[in-house]
Each structure stands twice: as C-alpha cells, then as structure tokens.
Image: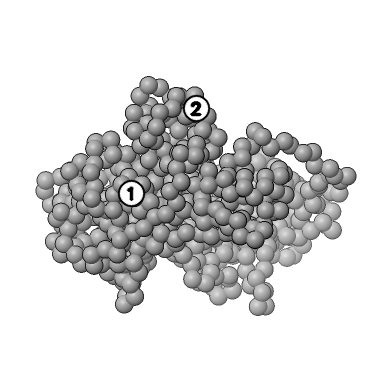
Amino acid sequence: MPVTIHSKKYMLKVLGFKTDDKELVKNIESMGPNVKRITAEEIEVEYPANRPDMISTLGLARAVRYYMRRSRSFGYSVGKGDGLKISVGSHVSKIRPYIAALVVENMRLGEDDLLDIINFTEKLSNTYGRKRVRIALGLHDMRDVHGPLTYDAYEDEEFVPLGSKTKMKYSAVMGSDKRGKRYEKLCREGDRYVALKDKKGTMSLIPVINSERTRVSASTTRMLVDITGGTREIIEGTADLLAADFIDRGFKVSRVEVAYGGRGRMLPEMKVKKFSIPLKQIDSEIGVTIGFNNAILLANKMGHEAALVGKNIRVSSPPYRLDYVDEQDIIEDIAVGYGYDYIQPVPVLSGTMGNLEAKSRRLDSVIETMIGLGFEEAMNSYLTNEETNFSKMRQENKKDYVNITNPRSGLATMLRTWMLPSLLKGVGQSMHDSFPLRLFEADMVFGIRGNAPEERYHLAAVSCHSKANFNEAKAALEGMLRALGSECTMTETDNRSFIEGRCATVEVDKKSIGVLGEVHPEVLTRFGIEEPAVGFEIELSEWLNPGKESAAGRD
C-alpha cells in the first residue's frame, strides 16, 4: 500500500483546528489508513490503495475533518473556462490515447503548499497511476502558455527539458534521462513521441518530463494540469479528484475543452455518483440496527451528502472518491463510520464443510509435481494481445480465438490461446535474476468451438539458461506424465516457434496432446531473452476429468 510522509505542521495548518497526537492518530486509523510513525515534525501514513484522495496532506486533512464532524461542505463547482482547447491528434491513439486537463487560478502558494501539490501528483502517478502506466500528471505555469494546445505523437523535435538550459531532441532526452529509459514504452512508437504542445512548442514529453518554459514555482498564480493515460474513465475521474483538491485549497478551477476529432468534451465534469439504499439492507449487511438518522449522520461523517427519501437513504458521493462501484461501497463506508470495533462478530452456523472438487485436487497435484521437478509457478493474466500470442511466437494470426470488442488498451485485445508466450514474456522480464530460470503454469487457455468460446486446461513450462536443451525439457515432461500415470511418445515436427529439427509433437495413446522443443532464436530476441530456452505445452483437460483414474489424485 502507498506510504506518504506529511509535514505535521502543515497537516495541522490545513486541518484548521488543534488536536493532540493521540486523537489525530485514532481518527486517521479509524478510517482505514495506518499511522506508521508520528513525531514532532512528521506523520508517516500508509493508505488503502483504493483511497488516492487521501494521498495529499490536504486530502487526508479533509477526510479527518469530516470524520471528526468539523466539516459539512459537500458541493464543488468549476468555472466554464476562457476557451482553452486541447486538440487530440490521430498518431497518439495507439500509444496513450486520452487526455484530460484543468486550469487552476487565483493560486497563492507557500513552499509547503507547492511541496504538497508536487508530492501528491508524483505519488498519485506512481501508485494509483501504476508508475505512470495508468495515468501520468503534468503541472504547467500558464504565464508562457499560448493556446490552442495539441496532444499527439510527433516526430523527433527539440525543446528545453525541465532543469536544463539547452535544447534537446526527444530521442536525446529518452537516451540520457533515467525516466526516459524507464518510460520509453509508454511514450514512443517507432519514430514518434507523445507530447503536449502549444503555439510556442513542446510543453511536455509525456510521461517523461515537462519543459523548463512551463516550470511551476511558488510564484505561480495560474496553472494548467494535464492527465494522460489509456482509459478515458480513469483519467477523467482523476481530473475530478485533482479539481476537488485544488478547490479545497481555496483556488478557482476552470474547465478545458478536449477535442477528439470534431467532438469536444469540457473537463473536469465533477461527476457525483448517487445511490439509493434501503435502510433494511444497510442494517442486514452491517449486522447492526443503525436507524435512519444515524445512517445519514454516518454517511455525512465519511464525506457524503445523505438524505432520507421514503424508506431509503439517498447518498451522493463527492467527485474525489474514485473507489465507488455500487451501493456496497457506501454500506462499507457507513460501517467504517460506525466503527468496526463496535460491531460484534456472529458465528456462522453451518452443518456442512467445504471441499475442493476433484478437478482442483488433480490440478493441485500437477502443480506440486512441477514444483518438485524444480520449476517455479507463474500466474499470468488470461488477457493478452495478437502480437504476444502470435507475432512474437512466429505464428500466423489465427481466426479461432476470443477477441475483445472495444478494448481499452492495446495490451489486452484477446484471450490467450496458449501459455508459452506468457511464460517467455516473464522470462524476458527476469533477465536480471539468477539462472537457471524455470517457470511453469497450469491454468486455462481459450478458443472457439463452433460458434461458442471454449475453455481448456493446459500445462506449460519453460527452462532458460546457457545449457538448456531438448533433452532437459523431454526429461521434465516425461517425469510429469509418469506422475499422471501416463507414458508419451514424441515425433519430430515443424513449429515456427521452435528450432527446426529440435521440436516434437507429444502423443499419449496415439493422440497428440502438445508440443515440446528448443525455442527459436528470433522468438527469444522478440521477448528480450539473452540465453537459450526450452519449453513444452500440453493439454491437461483429460487428466483433470473426475472420471479419469490417475496418480494425479484418485478419489
């Protein structure tokens, strides 16, 4: 979970009232965060990952004020703006397609304010933003910004990066800056780089570094904030969160028009989610009789606006709360406001005990056997893309796979048809680890049978080290099959993912169940693997059938 260190002096300043350490810690921890350390100068707080609104000192103070019933301000309003517009180009659509922005005005920044804003946006990008993959934020002093603005992927151009006095090309920044090397995959495709520009040139090489021209300082009175990423709902929700944070600092926030093609959107929208929950449901799920008045007070205590409508509690959640999906989240907040220490546990009365189904027991036995053979279990996503599943493996793009309609990211456009690509990807990302690397996975892959999706269980394994060879993979597979109570034969075959002459079809009872071989050098290169690798993948479904008696787990 994210950890932030706050200035205690600044915390008490934005809190707006005096309180001692014990009372402050008690109220912070009652809401869910954990105070790891408190001194005369600092407060170190560990936050739940679903509460990015608490990362800033001001956000934490706002939550404490509500919880201690020192605040009842629920509304947020933003200005229409002065016509500032960001046009989104077509080249950025496959890299980092979405942007949101807001203008902050009437700013009066002390050093503590500026430090909190910078720390907040940086921490937000690295935690909620998953190290700038999901979202990245940029702050710009607007004294030298001249609209309209454009957001696109551009060919190699020059600008003066933050902290520099000389112009540098995008490619030079990527090669010389540690952040450039770290975030290259997020902002570059071919010879184009993602950037935000105005009439005077580049304002930011996204998500790497801003320009020196738009540096924010304590003297900044008008600021542009940009948020970029691959999912529109997430970046626009983040814009709402930031706008609320700046409004609560006493600043004015105005909207910016973002135009995709000919269609414009005014952001931030400051969405307020509304829920209507029967009181009976709240009492039942929390396990305490709360009552209408208390339910409203507890919802207010957690920062919501609540009222009684008929026999339901109608709750409006503030735009900075990004963690709400449905009414269950509101009920959880009411329980937090009530206090878990005051909710008494009730024993669960049941006359039966749970049991693993036979298929799960057999699968567990397969996993234990692979671990006994010296492999480490990997757990990869079912989601992948055509490049990883087919192109990098030197396979033709087949038609009998489950694709995703309107994917939010180019990284997840289909369900995987086999597991070796995922394992090789994991090996490529682990080149810094000690060798040998031996990974396996026993789980589902997906295909199409007739017109319907089909799930199948596979076992795949990869071994990577300087002496990896066909015989090593053959011995591991034969040992695995013996544990399943089966023997196999192997017949030489051609498979473009493997080296010619070092690849075989695996057969059990004259039926083909998979493939084994030494991975082709081109495949290794495409996954960033620097050592030889061997691997196999077989069908497991028949052994997992409860009707099949085998050493994998007889009933």
Confirm whether residue 136 shows in the render. Answer: no
Which residue is at the front of the view, 95 or 527? 95
Which structural element holds mark 1?
helix
Amino acid identity at mark 1? Phe
Q: Residues within 10 Å of mark 1 (few under 14, many from 20)?
A: some
Residue 246: mark in rendering: 1
- Choose the circle earlier in sequence order: 2 or 1: 2
Which structural element holds mark 2?
helix
Q: Residues within 10 Å of mark 2 (few under 14, many from 20)?
A: few
Residue furthest out toward the right? 351
Horizontally, residue 343 falls left or right of residue 233, namely: right
Percent across and percent down for residue 35 are 48, 30
Which residue occupies 68% across, 62% down? 456
Horizontally, residue 9 falls left or right of residue 388, namely: left
Residue furthest out toward the top? 40
Percent across and percent down for residue 537 are 62, 57
Horizontally, residue 543 falls left or right of residue 140, namely: right
**Above or below, 5 relative to 302:** above
Which residue is at the front of the view, 78 or 183? 78
Where does label 2 land, which residue?
A: 23
Which residue occupies 35% across, 37% down? 14
Percent across and percent down for residue 161 are 19, 49
Confirm whether residue 125 shows in the render. Answer: yes
Percent across and percent down for residue 522 are 43, 59
Which residue occupies 65% across, 61% down? 310
Question: Spatial distance from mark 2 to mark 1, Cα to Cα?
Answer: 27 Å
Which residue is at the front of the view, 35 or 526? 35
Amino acid identity at mark 2? Glu
Residue 383: mark in rendering: none
